[in-house]
Image (tube, grey):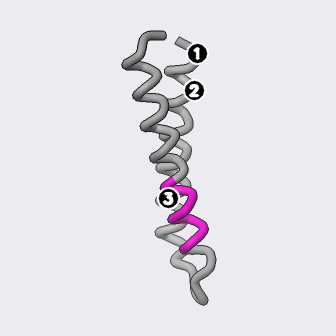
Amino acid sequence: MDVGEYDTIDSLRAKHADLEAKLQAEMRRPIPDEVAMSEIKRLKLRVKDQISQLESA
């Protein structure tokens, strides 16, 4: 892996952490938006898959 790939992985990890924070904030709402939560979870999974692909390359 070169430096650019490490930067990309770090960026994706930061995005994943941001999505997790958004998910936690949504879950703390009195009435969480299930559609928003599903979208956040879908995005988190996509980011996690991208990280895995880069790490295994």
Query: Who's the residue at 51% across and 51% down the image?
Result: 42
**Going 52% across and 47% down the picture, which residue do you hit?**
16
Question: Could you give the CA–CA distance between mark 3 and mark 1, rounded to whole angstroms?
Answer: 24 Å
* Three-letter residue code for mark 1: Ser
| Cα–Cα span, label 2 and label 1 | 6 Å
Tell whether position 51 is magenta: no
Q: Secondary structure at mark 1?
A: helix
Residue pointed to by mark 1: 56
The answer to whether residue 52 is above or below residue 2 is below
Asked which secondary structure carries label 2, the reply is helix
In this rendering, position of residue 6 left or right of residue 31: left
Between 3 and 53, the residue placed more toward the observer is: 3
Question: Farthest bottom residue?
Answer: 30
* Camera-nearest residue between 43 and 8: 8
Which percent across, then down, holds residue 48?
55, 37
How crowded pointer 3 is (Cα within 10 Å; few <14, some 14-19, many 20+) is rated as some
Up the image or down, 9 lies above or below 13; here it is: above
Q: Which residue is mark 2?
A: 52
Q: Amino acid at mark 3?
A: Ile
User: Mark 1 and mark 3 in contact (Cβ < 8 Å)?
Assistant: no
> Tags 2 and 1 in contact by the CB under 8 Å rule?
yes
Determine crowd level at label 2: few under 14, some 14-19, many 20+ residues with C-alpha closer than 10 A: few
The image position of residue 47, as x and y in percent, is 49, 40
Amino acid, disc 2:
Ser
Most common secondary structure along the magenta stretch: helix
The x, y position of residue 50, in whole percent, is 48, 30
Is residue 24 magenta-colored?
Answer: yes
Q: Which mark is residue 40?
A: 3
The magenta segment is 18-25
Q: Secondary structure at mark 3?
A: helix
Which comes sooner in the sequence, label 3 or label 1?
3
